[in-house]
Amino acid sequence: MEPLKHECGVAMIRLLKPLSYFKEKYGSYTYALDHLYLLMEKQHNRGQEAAGVGVVKLNTPPGHEYVFRERALGTGAIDEIFGQIGRQLPKNVNSLSAEEIATSTPFVGEVYMGHLRYSTTGRSGMEYTHPFLRRNNWRSRALMLCGNFNMTNVDEIFNNIIATGQHPRIYSDTVLLLEQIGDALDEENHRLYRQYRDTLVDPILAKRIEDELDLGRVLKATSPLWDGGYAMCGVTGSGSSFVVRDPHGIRPAFYYFNDEIAVVASERPVIQTVFGVHIDDVHELTPGCAILIDRQGGVEVRRIMPELKNERCSFERVYFSRGSDADIYSERKKLGANIVPDLCRMIDERFDRTVFSFIPNTAEVAFFGMVEELHKRLDRKRKSEIEELVAAGELTSERLDNIILQRKVRVEKVAIKDIKLRTFIAEGTSRNDLATHVYDITYGSVNAHKDTLVVIDDSIVRGTTLRQSILRILDRLHPVEIIVVSSSPQVRYPDYYGIDMPHLEELAAFRSMISLLDKQGRSKVIDDAYHAALLNSTRPAAEQENVVKQLYDEFTDIEIANQMAEMLTPSEINARVKLLFQSIDGLHDAVPSCPGDWYFSGNYPTPGGTRMVNRAFIDYYERCRAVRYKPHP
């Protein structure tokens, strides 16, 4: 498939011992900084558009900087950031005194956060790069924020903020959340100030506020307004920190604590690898809960919101997360295995005339599962045939040789990822010609004009790479038929919870469904859906229905798959092309812990998702079909 832009990745480290402890035990003041680099680098897959690092020092005296931030754009952002940080560190940093570390050494502190970004809104640039920072002369009111999230009700949050008299300078969910949480943080400071103002005086009063700041109260005051998927990290200038996860568990978050450190990351195996800990030591943050760490290093997991229906993202398991996670690896194999019954019907059990392969690199694990299941299926078929021959007294050496030795699952590595498409060729025929060489092929792996070639991919989203590159290249092997298998169901709907998915009309499944309606002369169905979407848009989000689902209901999955195959097959292809998709039931069977399937089913986990898909359909219709529209008489 053409790569989707992943949702973002987060990493957070809180030292629970003094910096001198890590210098003495591990030989370096930069223990946390070094490990933050590893956490971010091993989550590089989650964001290659930008990255950022934030650090808070707890023991810096007044007059010295205590909050540091470094951000960079581009695929090399991580190396650029840590290179910049390294140049700011004294060469003899590990020979410095504790006082020098506290007063004059940047980026050596007790609280660290890291962020990897892919834009989910089309907005890019440094002003949209996390972490975001809200400065204040009172450390307990300063706030740094980053997250893997997208809010579907930004308008509502914006109106809530301006109703308090604030004037946000950027209209983005991250900035709005920073200001909303910052306002609640100010209120928490005021609460403690009112509690102690009659018994304490500054600076003792300010210190007491820092020590007793309750970020759980701040999150409970702000989170009820949020509609979206999120794993969000925050830290105050005084060192109190939090990580909070949405109540449906849409976006992932994992943590590890011991008596030295508290660590949070978007993926479990990253923590396992970087800190060398067992899988059982790394825990998933329960949806609706927050990890709260106070200034003194006290760690608490507290419920902030009621846990709602489990909507953990299934696409996270199919594609986005690293396959090195033990559970994800087995799930992806099961996805490949679950497609086998339908695949065998499609090839009519002709193993002798079928070659099986995969599209590198993300579909490789599903391929393993598919091949294992094919072997099992063929073994069962062999056993049955042998038993029948034995019962009939007709088992001969020749027949046994034919059953066991001649009939095999033919596995080849047909496609090889050869080069990366160069972005300096931006338009037209040259770019399309170059795209055909993204993959290379293994010549001689298919019997020309005789074999069916089956290739498995993890998903088909836009279908652009399939049409421009993969099918053209595979056809050079001259198979009689090419079957492209998707280990996930048809991607029919955009995501609105932190993953950069295409607009409706860019989705191959949506284009195919619309094409079928047009071919059948049923464009009125599309017009009616537009009117239904307009009517829905006048209702509260919680009362809206997904009108796009009604359009898909006009056809079977197979009809849409066949139309998609027709639309994505270039005219010069000689082989017959078919598409086979995982069923939604097969997805849930393989990935039972993460049932969130709105990309495939249109069953959005929050009202905001339904509202946004209806809005997307209205935008599509008015942009792409308004000229065809004829008002009802």
Image (spheres, rainbow, N blue to C red):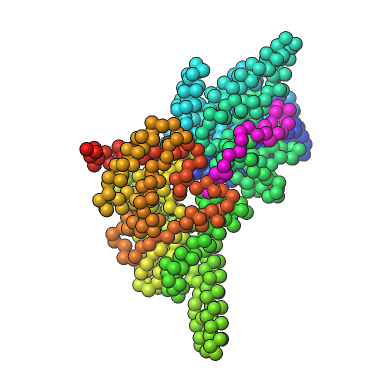
Task: Give the overall secondary structure of the magenta segment.
Answer: loop
Q: Residue 293: within the magenta?
A: yes
Residue 194 locus on image (x, y percent): 68, 13
The C terminus sits in image quarter: top left
Q: Which of 112 and 505 is in front in this view?
A: 505
Say if 257 sits above or below 206 in the image. below
Q: Which of 327 and 492 is in front in this view?
A: 492
Total of numbered circles in the picture? 0
The residue stretch that appears in magenta:
291-314
Q: Left or right: where does residue 509 sit relative to residue 147?
A: left
Q: Left or right: where does residue 239 sit relative to residue 384?
A: right
Q: Residue 438: within the magenta?
A: no
Point 49% across, 79% down: residue: 406
Point 64% across, 40% down: residue: 285
Say if 578 sits above or below 103 in the image. below
Q: Which of 322 and 159 is in front in this view?
A: 159
